[in-house]
Each structure stands twice: as structure tokens, then as C-alpha cells.
Image (spheres, helix red, strand yellow):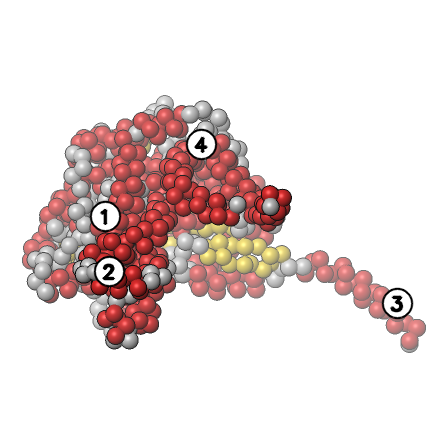
């Protein structure tokens, strides 16, 4: 038995080896190269010459600057925290709705799922451009509708007003990525045995109680995975913020990814931007540890 | 007869072998960074007819990405043979080893009406006297007014000072409900508030980067003056004659600025030549047989002259090119009078003698006058400070003050200190 297990392990390892080799070439090497660059004064215009070693000066500068903590806050709280929570909550609600008896009764299952796929099929760049027009202060359809309905007296500067800019950016992110969350929850919901719900109904559980005591415990692993994965995907996201506000007004919406771009490609400080990248990677590694602890370890145990 | 055929064939084969290298096609690549690539495509067909041994592949790129893309490619031995780049990039790209020095080519083969005829050529030099780009087309910014909106607001006189401009903008909003002077105040790599601030400083006797008599680069402005100008531009947003939403718009030619202008919902704008040309052309397509409502005029001024930057694009030859001679022939063609007369009519050549021969239509007269006041970026470009970094910081500091995160005084000092720090690298 033990020999058979060892043989299987060897087989698994040999099958995985090419993938690890590719990972080492395309991920590990660039990571170490970036780590080295973060200790140099490498400039974008000095790529041929290379940078000089300056020790941990880039990290010291990074941690001493007040701006960086603002960037960190924006990334962790607004871009990631709020947007992930909103996506998970709305995605869960959407999945419940799509799985409901009402949708089935009116034969809306296929149509509603197709409609749900539209935002997901829209490339983020297109989504941002469309929303920038929709939310434009002078020409945007949203402001025109709000004015026509008498909801506001004056058009809202969705991207220029600090009260609105983050909610507007998050709206775009949520619109574009919600379907993936919703459909994942829907798949998990459909694996829930109907007998459990029926038994809860027979026991007199209200709808809220069924959600709390039957559905949520069943969906817990899915919620954990989707929350962690959404966190990974969002934390490093550059596109939504850059195309919507470029980090402005001022640096009000500046996040880690846009800061890396600004330092590397506008200010030419590749060494310094590498340090920011390494710092962000360390934060991501912390999330990865949680992910490994919660999800992947169980899966590995099953395989090995 | 048959006996003579083999020697004849041999002679033909030999002749073909000798002739072939002379007819061999040399292929080079030209990367053009403006949206109207069709103009260039037609021009390249013309070039290939005039130079039968040279084939040119046209590559397109976004202007905003052109510099970074070339830096990355050149570092690994790639990139186009000839690249279309901003005036202020070529020096840095040359020092970085991405562009080849052109001194020998200019000396031995010549270009245009002579090197001294090119405008802003000083921006292409490094400290050793090597130069890395040939100024191609020149550009500056000027004011654009919608005559109908101004008339509706009761404004009869074109603003001459910055205060006049603000009053006019205010009046348009008050009397017509339309946007007065609409301009972007947003952040981003190529934000426009940088230009507006500099135009104000220059026309009022200051400059963010200067060179003193000893040749040292210094800040030629006080933090208080920076704050004053920030506050001036912010007043348009605060008073509401420039929509607050424009605080999120970075560039002057974005649809949020151009569309209201084209629709007559905005009275005043400031535009680069090529944006104005596309506005006029677009308006004429939308409104055939109607009188153009736009006219251009020099920018307002403070205590000095209405100064804007003499911008434009240069042509650089990639340091990795295997075909420098063919590349140079293309550069010579693209800077010729024929090219500007036949293919590139909407743009203005960066050569004094050709510029003097250009015909400015009535709606462009303001730009024609503005060219006489325009200055090159000079010490901004040749000094140790990275233009992109100062550019970016200007928008960040202005934006932070505009949204109330910090006072205008603090924002002014922040930008001043940032520039001073950059200048310490000399």
C-alpha cells in the first residue's frame, strides 16, 4: 500500500514538474529580477546601462512617504475591501434570485442567465468607456435621467466629486465582474439538495432562517474561495482606476497598481516602482497564505 | 545558332546576378503615433515610388505610449527604424541609447533647408553636442472661441488678460447657462493642467524651471506664485463655469471637452493645432454649408506676452536600425516641402522657412499669431528634472488642493519642493 502511494506521488510530481519549470522561468525569475531591481536606482531610460545598487533606500523612501499610506488605504479599503464585499453580497442575492421558483415559473432561466453574461463578456476597457459617458456630468444619460425625474437639481460630477468618485469606480468594477460571482454562487446553490430546503420548510423555517441555517452553511466554502479569489484579482487591478480617473482628482483614487505605473513610466523610477511592486507582492503573499490554509491545503491533502 | 545559346544564357544569368543586389528591396519600418495614419500611408506610397529600392512598413501606435514602447523595444535590440516622437522625448531617448545620434547623417547627407532652419532643435541635443531627432511638425496651443456663444453672452471683445478670460467664462455661464471656459483639471500621464499653469507662469514673468547665468538649473518661480495660479484655475471649477466633472478629465482633446464645444454648449476652449483642426473638420461634416462659429486667438497674458510652448514631434532613427541610409531618406522625405504640401497639409512643418510659406486659413489666424509668442521647453527638457515627473506632480498638487485635501499654499510648496529636489540631480 505504502509503495503504491509512493509510486503515485512520484507520478504526480513528474507530471507537475514541467509546469513548475515553466512557473520558475516565467514567474520565479522575473520575481527575483524585480527584487534585485528594487535595490537599485534603475531608470526607465537607463535600461541598457542597468541601475546601481543602493541598498534598501527605495523601501525606506516608500515607507517614509505619507502618500504611500493613502495609496495603501485606497487599495485595501476602497478598491478591494468595499468592491469585493459588494460583489459577494450582490452576487449572492443575484444567485438566489436566479435560482428562485419565480424565475423558473416564468421560464426566464435561460434568458436571465444570458443577460447576466453580457457584462462579463464586455471587455473592461469598453465597460469603463461606456460608464464614463453614462456618468458624464454634462452629456451623461444618468445625469439627464436624474434631472428629468427631479431627483437632483444639478448634475453630479461622478468622477470629479470626492463623495462620488469611489462609488462610481466601484460601480463599474461590480457591473463588470458581478456575473462571475453570481454564476459561481448559482452553481453552488444548484448543488444544494432540495430535500434540505423542504425539510426546513416542513420544520417551519422562514425564508430568512432557511438562508441563514441551510443555504449559507452550504455555500460557505464557495463564499470563502470566491472572496479570496476576488481579492487577488482586484488588489492588483490597474485598469479600472487608471482609465476612469488616472488616480485623481489629485491622488484621491490612486492605488498601488497605478502608483507603480506612475513611478515607472511617468517618473522613470523603475527601481523605486519595483520596490512598490515587491511590497504589494508581499501583501498578496499574505492573502495567498490564507488561501492555502483555507482552501488549497485541503485539496492538496486529497491529492497527495 | 544553338551553340550560342548556352553562353548567352550564362551571360544573362550573370547579368541578373549582378543587377539583383542593386534592385534588392530594403525594408524599413516607420512608426507613426497620431490617429490619421491614412495620410501617412498615402505619403509612403509616394515615397516608395520615388525610392524604388526601399519599402516602408507603417506601424501605428498611440502617442501616449510611443516613448515607453520604444524604450522597451530598443533595450532588447528591437523597435521601428524611424519613430514619430514628441520634441521633448528625443534627448532622453538618445541618452538612453534608444535613438542614434544624427550629427553625421545631417553633416554628410543634409536635411530640409539645413539644420539651422529647424525650430526647437535645441531640445534634441545632449550635453556632448550629439542630437537625436529631426523636428518634424510643430504645434502650439491657442484659444478657441465660439462666436455665437460669445455674442449670446454679450461679449464683444476677445479676452486679452487672464482676468478678462475668467470674466468672459463667468459671463457665459451667467447669461447663457452654458459652459464658459471648459478645460480638464484631472490627473494622468499627459494631463493638461500642466500646460495651463505653465502658460500662466510664463506670461507673467515666471517659469518653473530656469537656467541662471552660471548655467545652473533653478526654479524660476515662488511657491506663492504656484499657489496663486492653482487658485486661479480652481476658481473656474468652484464658480461652476467649468463643470466639476472636468476635474476627472486629463487631456484637452477628450470627448468631454470636444463634444460640448462642437455642439455649441461651451463657449471657450484652449486647444493644440491638431485638435482644433479635427474640431473644425468634424464640425463642418456635421454642419455642411454653415458658417463656422469658431475662431482662434492668442492666449491671454499677465504682465508679459501671451506665451505658450512650441511643441511638436520629431523623427528619431532607432539606434538598432540596420538600414540607417534608407531610414534617413525617409526622414528627408517626411521633412520636405513636397510632403507637407501634398500629404500633410493639416500640420505645420517644424522649419522656419517652410512655416513662413504655409497658408493659414482665417480660423487659424490665432494660431499663426500664437506661433510668434511660443517658446520651447528649453531648460525643462535639457535640465536634470524629468518633465513627466513635474508634469504628473503638477496635476497631483493642483487636484489635491482643488478637492480640499490641502491648502493651495501647501500644494504650491509641495510642487516647488518637488521640482527643487529634481533639480538637485544636476
Q: List the residue tagged with mark 1.
A: A166
Q: CA distance from mark 2 to mark 1?
A: 41 Å
The quarter in which the N terminus of chain B is drawn is bottom right
Mark linked to residue A38? 4
What secondary structure is found at the residue carrying circle 3?
Answer: helix
> Residue B144 placed where, x, y %?
23, 55
Q: CA distance from mark 2 to mark 3?
A: 103 Å
> Residue B246 placed where, x, y %?
21, 51
Tell me which corner region of the image, top left, top right, bottom left or bottom right, holds residue A68: top left
Q: CA distance from mark 2 to mark 4?
A: 57 Å
Residues at discs 2 and 4 both on one chain: yes
What secondary structure is found at the residue carrying circle 2?
Answer: helix
Q: List the residue tagged with mark 2.
A: A200
Mark 4 neighbour density, 10 Å: few (under 14) some (14–19) many (20 or more):
many
Mark linked to residue A70? none
Q: List the residue tagged with mark 3.
A: B7
Foreground mark, 2 or 4, reads 2
Tell me which corner region of the image, top left, top right, bottom left or bottom right, holds residue A117: bottom left
Q: Of B391 and A240, which appears nearest the observer?
A: A240
Is mark 4 in CB contact (under 8 Å) with mark 1?
no
Foreground mark, 4 or 3, reads 4
The quarter in which the C terminus of chain B is drawn is top left
Q: CA distance from mark 1 to mark 3?
A: 84 Å
Amino acid at each position: 500500500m505504502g509503495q503504491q502511494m509512493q509510486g503515485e506521488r512520484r507520478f504526480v510530481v513528474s507530471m507537475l514538474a514541467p509546469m513548475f519549470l515553466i512557473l520558475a522561468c516565467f514567474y520565479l525569475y522575473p520575481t527575483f529580477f524585480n527584487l534585485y531591481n528594487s535595490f537599485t536606482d534603475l531608470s526607465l531610460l537607463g535600461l541598457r546601462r542597468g541601475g546601481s545598487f543602493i541598498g534598501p533606500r527605495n523601501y525606506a523612501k516608500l515607507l517614509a512617504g505619507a502618500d504611500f499610506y493613502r495609496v495603501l488605504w485606497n487599495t485595501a479599503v476602497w478598491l478591494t475591501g468595499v468592491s469585493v464585499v459588494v460583489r459577494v453580497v450582490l452576487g449572492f442575492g443575484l444567485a438566489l434570485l436566479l435560482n428562485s421558483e419565480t424565475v423558473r415559473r416564468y421560464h426566464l432561466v435561460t434568458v436571465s442567465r444570458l443577460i447576466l453574461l453580457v457584462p462579463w463578456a464586455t471587455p473592461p476597457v469598453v465597460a469603463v468607456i461606456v460608464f464614463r459617458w453614462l456618468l458624464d456630468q454634462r452629456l451623461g444619460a444618468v445625469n439627464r435621467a436624474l434631472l428629468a425625474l427631479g431627483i437632483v437639481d444639478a448634475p453630479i460630477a461622478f468622477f470629479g466629486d470626492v463623495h462620488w468618485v469611489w462609488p462610481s469606480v466601484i460601480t463599474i468594477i461590480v457591473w463588470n465582474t458581478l456575473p462571475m460571482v453570481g454564476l459561481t454562487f448559482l452553481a453552488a446553490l444548484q448543488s444544494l439538495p432540495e430535500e434540505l430546503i423542504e425539510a426546513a420548510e416542513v420544520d417551519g423555517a422562514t425564508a430568512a432562517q432557511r438562508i441563514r441555517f441551510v443555504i449559507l452553511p452550504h455555500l460557505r466554502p464557495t463564499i470563502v474561495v470566491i472572496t479570496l479569489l476576488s481579492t487577488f484579482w482586484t488588489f492588483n487591478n490597474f485598469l479600472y482606476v487608471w482609465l476612469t480617473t488616472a488616480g485623481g482628482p489629485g491622488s484621491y483614487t490612486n492605488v498601488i497598481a497605478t502608483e507603480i505605473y506612475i513611478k515607472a513610466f511617468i517618473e522613470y523610477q523603475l527601481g523605486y516602482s519595483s520596490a512598490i511592486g515587491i511590497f504589494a507582492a508581499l501583501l498578496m503573499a499574505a492573502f495567498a497564505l490564507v488561501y492555502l490554509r483555507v482552501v488549497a491545503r485541503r485539496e492538496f491533502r486529497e491529492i497527495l | 545558332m544553338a551553340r550560342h545559346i548556352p553562353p548567352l544564357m550564362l551571360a544573362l544569368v550573370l547579368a541578373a546576378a549582378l543587377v539583383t543586389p542593386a534592385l534588392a528591396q530594403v525594408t524599413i519600418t516607420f512608426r507613426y503615433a497620431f490617429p490619421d495614419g491614412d495620410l501617412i500611408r498615402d505619403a509612403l506610397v509616394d515615397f516608395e515610388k520615388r525610392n524604388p529600392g526601399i519599402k516602408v512598413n507603417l506601424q501605428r501606435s498611440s502617442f501616449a505610449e510611443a516613448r515607453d514602447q520604444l524604450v522597451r523595444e530598443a533595450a532588447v535590440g528591437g523597435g521601428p527604424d524611424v519613430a514619430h516622437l514628441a520634441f521633448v522625448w528625443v534627448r532622453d531617448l538618445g541618452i538612453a541609447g534608444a535613438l542614434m545620434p544624427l550629427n553625421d547623417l545631417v553633416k554628410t547627407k543634409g536635411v530640409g533647408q539645413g539644420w539651422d532652419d529647424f525650430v526647437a532643435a535645441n531640445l534634441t541635443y545632449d550635453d556632448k553636442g550629439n542630437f537625436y531627432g529631426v523636428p518634424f511638425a510643430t504645434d502650439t496651443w491657442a484659444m478657441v472661441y465660439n462666436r455665437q456663444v460669445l455674442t449670446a453672452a454679450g461679449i464683444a471683445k476677445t479676452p486679452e488678460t487672464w482676468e478678462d478670460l475668467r470674466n468672459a467664462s463667468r459671463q457665459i455661464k451667467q447669461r447663457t447657462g452654458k459652459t464658459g471656459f471648459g478645460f480638464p483639471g484631472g490627473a494622468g500621464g499627459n494631463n493638461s493642467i500642466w500646460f495651463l499653469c505653465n502658460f500662466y507662469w510664463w506670461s507673467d514673468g515666471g517659469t518653473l524651471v530656469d537656467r541662471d547665468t552660471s548655467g545652473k538649473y533653478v526654479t524660476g518661480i515662488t511657491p506663492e506664485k504656484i499657489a496663486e495660479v492653482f487658485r486661479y484655475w480652481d476658481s473656474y471649477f468652484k464658480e461652476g463655469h467649468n463643470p466639476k466633472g472636468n476635474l476627472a478629465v486629463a487631456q484637452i482633446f477628450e470627448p468631454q471637452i470636444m463634444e460640448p464645444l462642437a455642439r455649441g454648449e461651451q463657449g471657450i476652449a484652449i486647444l493644440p493645432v491638431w485638435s482644433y483642426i479635427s474640431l473644425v473638420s468634424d464640425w463642418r461634416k456635421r454642419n455642411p454649408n454653415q458658417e463656422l462659429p469658431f475662431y482662434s486667438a492668442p492666449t491671454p497674458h499677465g504682465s508679459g506676452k501671451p506665451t505658450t510652448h512650441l511643441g511638436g514631434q520629431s523623427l528619431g532613427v532607432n539606434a538598432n536600425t540596420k538600414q540607417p541610409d534608407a531610414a534617413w531618406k525617409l526622414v528627408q522625405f517626411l521633412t520636405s516641402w513636397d510632403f507637407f504640401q501634398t500629404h500633410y497639409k493639416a500640420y505645420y512643418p517644424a522649419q522656419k522657412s517652410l512655416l513662413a510659406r504655409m497658408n493659414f486659413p482665417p480660423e487659424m489666424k490665432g494660431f499663426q499669431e500664437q506661433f510668434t509668442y511660443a517658446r520651447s521647453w528649453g531648460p525643462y527638457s535639457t535640465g536634470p528634472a524629468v518633465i513627466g515627473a513635474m508634469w504628473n506632480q503638477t496635476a497631483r498638487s493642483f487636484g489635491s488642493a482643488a478637492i480640499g485635501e490641502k491648502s493651495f499654499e501647501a500644494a504650491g510648496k509641495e510642487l516647488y519642493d518637488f521640482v527643487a529636489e529634481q533639480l538637485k540631480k544636476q
